Amino acid sequence: MPSPTWQKSSYCAQGNSCIHVAAPTPGTIGLTESADPTGAVLHTTPTAWAALLHAIKKDLPHD
């Protein structure tokens, strides 16, 4: 099985504290923190991930 392709958050500033997201298997979203890329990976469903993103975006200030 190939390794997942991790994508760094577009909201990540310079430094080592960034969230990386990948789809390691169909129907699964993986999240990890760039300061420790060999550390724990949180797995969730696409539905739960979409709900989290929606909630976060809803509370962001609008330009």
Image (cartoon, rainbow, N blue to C red):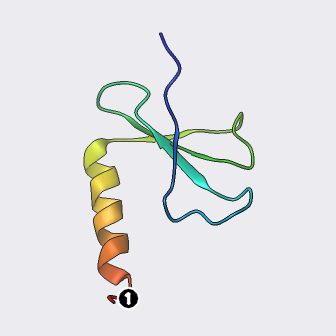
Q: Residue at x 28, y 55 (%)?
A: 50
- Does residue 25 appear to the left or right of 4 in the view shown? left
Q: Is residue 41 above or below residue 55?
A: above
Residue closest to the far left: 47
Q: Position of residue 18 (x, y in %)?
A: 62, 56
Left or right: 38 with respect to 42?
right
Q: Amino acid at mark 1?
A: Pro
Q: Position of residue 48 (x, y in %)?
A: 31, 52
Residue 45: quadrant of the picture: top left
Which residue is pictured at 35% across the width and 82% down the height? 59
Q: Element type at marker 1?
A: loop
Residue that lies at the very extreme toward the top in this rendered image: 1
- Exactly how many numbered labels are in the figure? 1
Q: Compared with residue 42, is residue 55 higher up or lower down, i.e. above or below?
A: below
Q: Residue at x 29, y 31 (%)?
A: 27
Q: Residues within 10 Å of mark 1 (few under 14, many from 20)?
A: few
Q: Position of residue 56 (x, y in %)?
A: 37, 72
Q: Which residue appears at 49% of the width and 26% of the height?
A: 4
Most foreground residue, 59 or 12:
12
**Residue labelled with disc 1:** 61
The C terminus: image quadrant? bottom left
